[in-house]
Image (cartoon, grey):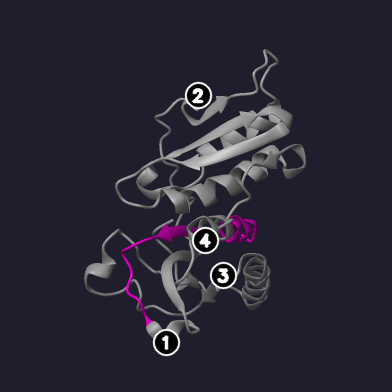
Amino acid sequence: MRKYIDRPIEAEKVAAIRQFIDECNRESGLHLQLVTDEPLAFSTGIFSYGKFTGVTNYIALVAPKQGDYREAIGYQGEKIVLFMQTLGLNTCWVGLTFKDIKDAYVLNPGEELKFVIACGYGEDGGVQHPQKKPITHFYRDKRGTTEPIPDWFMRGIEAAMIAPTAVNQQKFLFTLLPGGRVEAKAKFDFIGYSHYDLGIVKYHFEVGAGKENFSWVTSPGSR
């Protein structure tokens, strides 16, 4: 969602989102923050590029400078995105087309702002990116058996396919292994966002497949 209406997020929803973000931060070691009523990041100059209008709220994706937190940012950020959707809000991941308003969020020593996620009440229901790749493009079965692929795995792949990725590139691959184990890898991309995208699609896979049905070879956001 790139176009938002002039409607503040209600106080009770702000409180719920901040509580949810606190839980995500404790789990991941990130410093994600909700910024409200801040109109400057999307209002002027080149930062109005990308057809964003009416954005006054966003999630500041703040992480330590040291260490690789790319997957964790994608995973936890998308958790927040889907939680906000349950509250009737809309969102959009934003990598470049915003202005960094330094006093809008808190940076502790050794931290930096990576991205933001625009959020609020959208003008309409948004537009789903068209799906141009077949489902078989996104997974491999390496169990060494002729047994059918489990329904939970295919539900996970279908959920991953509708996850947001940078310029809709979908540079990811899931592999089904013996013993209900799943491996997810990011493919090479020229813009350098595939590891953030991997965290996003792994959370979608969990929601679709059900965490009780499988185990990751490498847990989301591990470093």
Q: Is residue 161 magenta?
A: no
Residue at 48% over, 61% down: 68
In the picture, which quadrant includes the C terminus? bottom right
Residue at 50% over, 78% down: 36
Q: Measure how far apart labels 2 and 4 are at the Cα level.
A: 27 Å
Counting residues from the start of the chain, the first of labels 2 and 1 encountered is 1
Task: Say which element carries label 3.
Answer: loop
Q: Residue 147 — which label?
A: none
Counting residues from the start of the chain, the first of labels 4 and 1 encountered is 4
Q: Amino acid at mark 2?
A: Thr
Task: Say left or right for 178 vs 183.
Answer: right
Q: Residues within 10 Å of mark 2 (few under 14, many from 20)?
A: few
Q: Residue 30 — which label?
A: 3
Percent x, y of residue 159 = 58, 39
From the image, tell me which residue sits under label 4: 73
Q: Residues within 10 Å of mark 4 (few under 14, many from 20)?
A: many
Residue at 39% over, 58% down: 2
Counting residues from the start of the chain, the first of labels 1 and 3 encountered is 3
Magenta range is 79-101
Q: Measure how far apart labels 4 and 1 are at the Cα level.
A: 21 Å
In the picture, which quadrant includes the N terminus? bottom left
Percent x, y of residue 59 = 50, 69
Pick out the residue farthest to the top. Answer: 146
Counting residues from the start of the chain, the first of labels 2 and 3 encountered is 3
Percent x, y of residue 99 = 32, 74
**Which residue is nearer to you in this view: 195 or 3?**
195
Residue 10 is drawn in which quadrant?
A: bottom right
Residue at 42% over, 28% down: 133
From the image, tell me which residue sits under label 2: 136
From the image, tell me which residue sits under label 1: 103
The reply to whether the C-beta atoms of the residues labelled 2 and 1 are less than 8 Å apart is no
